[in-house]
Image (cartoon, rainbow, N blue to C red):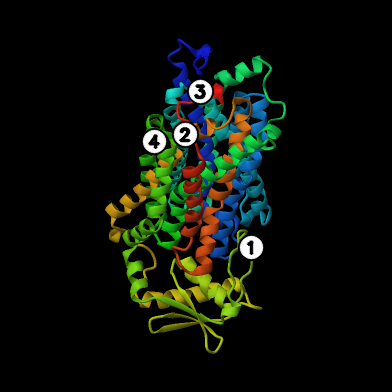
Amino acid sequence: MASQAAPHEGQSWSMSRVVVASSAGTAFEWYDFFIFGSLTPVIAKVFLAGLDPTGALVAALALFAVGFAFRPLGAIIFGAMGDRVGRKATFLATVSLMGGATFAIGLLPTYAQAGIIAPILLILLRIAQGTALGGEYGGAAIYVAEHAPDAKRGAATGWIQSSASFGLLAALLVIFATRLALGTEAFDAWGWRIPFLVSIVLLGISVWMRVKLSESPHFAKLKEEGATSKTPLRESFATRDSLRRVIIAFLGIMCAQGAVWYFTFFYMQVFLERSLGVSAEIKDGLLIAMTLASAPLYVFFGWLSDRIGRKPVMLGGMLLALLFYFPGSHMIARSANPALVAAQERTPVFVETDLATCSSQFDPTGTAKFTSACDIAKSTLIARGVAYSTVPSVDGQTRVLAGESATAVPSGEGTDLKALKASVATSINGALQRVGYPTSADPAAIDYPPLLFALFLFVVAATALYGPQASALVEMFPTRIRYTAMSLPYHVGTGWVGGFLPVTSFAIVAATGNVYAGLWYSVVFTAISAFVTLVFIKETRGKPLDTI
């Protein structure tokens, strides 16, 4: 008997309805989640005004990561619910929780209005968002996969994968249009709320579409036979065979997914805007172009995996990313801000200091107070996007050396640290300008063809990995525990590896002074997955779900 559902035979509209309703709801949830990532610099100003600019940005990136950190919890809660109660009820619950939390963020008081209460409330709502998204993806991917014909499962679930790009695109377009209509000053003051508040309309549409869906045929059959799992968590993680599959799914697919996809669509935003000085408007335009290019590629690579297999397509994406991380990032830098690259090659910057006073500046919460002269000098340079090398000082004093210029940097102990950092930044920026360092990327000097080419290759790598991923994960686990067993490795990979990529990579850059050092985070996780995929993952394309 074919694995597609009997209740839907003869209804030509049923499969398209399943795909559209599932993908639309998932796109809405991604829209909710991506708004926060795209507005990280604004969030830093609005909710973390008590910190210096670099600390505020790191803290905002950490807040972005908080949502990801709780996705595995959502995977456990909603995964067990999906395997016990059903797919439909579960992803109705997740979309409602996500939409409510996002709308509430648009109503929050700012730091200036409520002080420390504002970021605390924001953290709680980010936790709600992350928990909701932890149950969403698995439910949507499984629901579509359990309706799709065996031979077309990759293409069908490719639409679920593309929903991430639709959600990101919607977030970027709403932010871009709002900023354009209001102007940067008004947008930063209050207009940032509009993208969050708009989500209430999208929530209503998503819930309406999903209410009209019936239960997954595979789960309905299982429930009718009384064969649903009473203990999906135990069956998924306490039996040797299932646990082995979970570990392989995490190491072989999800580590790379978290590294490649979030590098391409999130860390790249930080790299362009903070490290290269590209304006927010141009950065958003580039991200919109990347997202538009990615949307059909998810479905294409899902379709391709139906023809040649899941494994070769996903492995190809991983290898492309590994080969291109460093040369691609250098190409992007030279194309986006050639004056900065030329200045760094012509006049390298050094921080001359007592090395014993230098901290790693790895601060995921953004709340640490780095008061040594060495730390102040380094954080100022990183905030400007300028690479540097650290050298020992003969007299123990700290100076920033750029050509013939030597800018003394005092310690921040016992002083108004914020005022001191502002003063030091003015002095260092003046010295850098005198030796040819640009204050930002010149829009007229951006070389768009190689820039777009490099960005597009990263998009190809990310979509080749992500396109077949849903079908590959679904085909690894049996129906009775599929929601639970699949969701946890997915959200540990994307939630922890991907979610912590921006804040960790940025912190590595801050610690080393090398704007490319943060790439090693993505390289390591992608390499792990490439090896595990090559050695341990078996091909599953076209496999009937009721035989797993």
**Which one is closest to the eye, mark 3 or mark 1?**
3
Amino acid type of the residue tagged 2 in the rendering: Glu
**Which one is closest to the eye, mark 4 or mark 2?**
2
Does label 2 or label 3 sit earlier along the sequence? 2
Query: What's the CA distance linking mark 1 and mark 2?
Result: 47 Å
Compared with residue 534, is residue 513 higher up or lower down, i.e. above or below? below
**Nearest to the observer: residue 465 or residue 407:** 465
Which mark is drawn over residue 427? none
Q: Residue at x 46, y 21 (%)?
A: 149
Query: What's the CA distance linking mark 2 and mark 3?
Result: 13 Å
Residue 532 makes an appearance in the image: yes
Give the residue at mark 3. 544
Amino acid type of the residue tagged 4 in the rendering: Phe
On the picture, is 412 further left or further right than 192? right
Residue 237, x across and y down, in percent: 67, 37
**Cβ atoms at labels 4 and 2 below 8 Å apart:** no
Which mark is drawn over residue 301? 4
Q: How many marks?
A: 4
**Cβ atoms at labels 1 and 4 below 8 Å apart:** no
Give the residue at mark 2. 539
Residue 402, x across and y down, in percent: 41, 79
Does label 1 or label 2 sit earlier along the sequence? 1
Give the residue at mark 1. 367
Compared with residue 224, is residue 31 higher up or lower down, i.e. above or below? below
